[in-house]
């Protein structure tokens, strides 16, 4: 933080510009082009860019610590810049491109209206709900699913540390996307079988991804609208990074359908960022607070404390939750059906 308060706040105000700079560099393929150091002219040829103008972009990327200039004025990736390559295991590039879409940024432009009303503003600003926009844009849907899948490794670690699944037979992942978390759990637990329940198009992608991962004999995907019903048959149900997308009434509707599908001795694992979970660093909590505002502007939704999740659970026919000790940024709330 700069000692000059004006300059410090000015830097914060430039944040939207930095976001769009990252988006442009990803779209141009700057980070993916730098397998080896390249001069501006060589980089411009690969990225089909105007060399003098590209030079202006890359010098700012150097300022951000994403690139560095080596011998013969050749640009190289830093450790930070490498995270924005398409082949980086973090899939951070997908997240940047997903969050930096113009409709999302337009919704953020109405944050003040969202705060005044307590409601989401995406539909008001863009003329359709965020989920509908995704459904109409296959590339946006692909990026969304890829950005969600990037979180699977840490979620798997959290789930395995939170509860003993050694006696579980079938795990049903509600809203499980392309099945990345389920695949990780099945790889860790060879005796477990699993099902992804998601929208028809997403379920088809999950079926293909699970088969490609060599799990086709133990995993499947079922088309599902979790506002209507959820498949039966699991002795463990998971719902990961889903409830924070919905307001309280919608979250209760989802959970009631999950409860209706469960036997009395099944269990539910809710995987989310719990606001008051212990052990968070300042940087992690700062990020969650920003995501909380993102949920507001897009969906009128929110991140929640454990007590707030317990309110949803008990209103839906579950016990209050047990919050597992965190081992990653993700938290696991375990609940059981009542009655």
Image (spheres, rainbow, N blue to C red):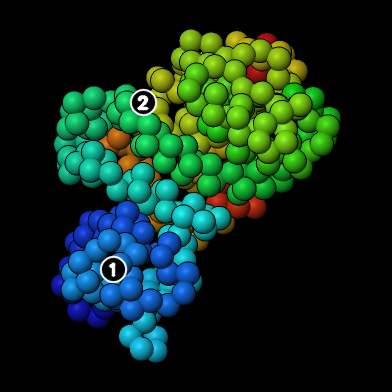
Q: Which residue is farthest bottom?
A: 71
Residue lying at 29% horizontally and 75% vertically, measured from the top left: 40
SS under mark 2? helix
Residue lying at 61% horizontally and 22% vertically, measured from the top left: 221
Residue labelled with disc 2: 135
Q: Quadrant of the N terminus?
A: bottom left
User: Quick one: 241 or 89, which is closer to the camera?
Assistant: 89
Residue lying at 49% horizontally and 52% vertically, measured from the top left: 91
Q: CA distance from mark 2 to mark 1?
A: 34 Å
The label shown at residue 44 is 1
User: Quick one: 330 or 104, which is closer to the camera?
Assistant: 104
Q: From what the image shows, is residue 214 above or below residue 147?
A: above
SS under mark 1? helix
Residue lying at 65% horizontally and 32% vertically, measured from the top left: 210
In front: label 2 or label 1: 1
The label shown at residue 115 is none
> Mark 1 Cα within 10 Å, few/some/many (few <14, many 20+)?
many
Residue 89 is left or right of residue 49, and the answer is: right
């Amino acid at each position: 933080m700069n000692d000059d308060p004006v300059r410090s706040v000015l830097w914060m105000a430039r944040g939207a510009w930095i976001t769009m700079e990252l988006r442009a560099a990803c779209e141009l393929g700057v980070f993916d082009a730098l397998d080896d150091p390249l001069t501006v002219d060589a980089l411009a040829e690969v990225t089909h860019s105007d060399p003098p103008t590209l030079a202006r972009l890359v010098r700012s990327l150097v300022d951000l610590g994403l690139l560095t200039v080596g011998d013969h004025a050749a640009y190289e990736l830093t450790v930070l810049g490498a995270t924005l390559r398409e082949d980086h295991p973090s899939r951070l590039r997908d997240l940047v491109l997903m969050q930096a879409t113009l409709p999302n940024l337009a919704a953020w432009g109405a944050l003040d209206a969202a705060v005044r009303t307590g409601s989401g503003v995406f539909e008001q600003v863009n003329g359709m709900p965020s989920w509908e926009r995704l459904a109409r844009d296959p590339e946006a849907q692909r990026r969304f699913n890829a950005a969600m899948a990037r979180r699977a490794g840490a979620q798997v670690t959290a789930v395995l540390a939170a509860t003993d699944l050694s006696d579980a037979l079938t795990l049903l992942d509600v809203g499980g996307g392309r099945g990345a978390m389920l695949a990780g759990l099945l790889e860790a637990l060879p005796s477990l079988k699993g099902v992804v329940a998601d929208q028809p198009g997403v379920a088809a992608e999950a079926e293909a991804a699970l088969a490609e991962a060599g799990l086709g004999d133990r995993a499947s995907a079922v088309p599902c609208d979790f506002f209507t019903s959820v498949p039966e048959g699991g002795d463990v149900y998971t719902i990961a990074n889903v409830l924070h997308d919905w307001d309280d009434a919608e979250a209760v509707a989802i959970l009631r359908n999950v409860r209706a599908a469960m036997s009395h001795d099944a269990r539910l694992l809710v995987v989310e960022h719990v606001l008051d979970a212990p052990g968070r660093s300042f940087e992690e909590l700062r990020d969650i607070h920003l995501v909380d505002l993102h949920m507001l502007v897009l969906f009128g939704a929110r991140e929640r404390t454990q007590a707030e999740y317990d309110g949803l659970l008990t209103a839906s026919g579950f016990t209050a939750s047990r919050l597992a000790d965190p081992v990653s940024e993700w938290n696991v709330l375990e609940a059981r059906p009542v009655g």
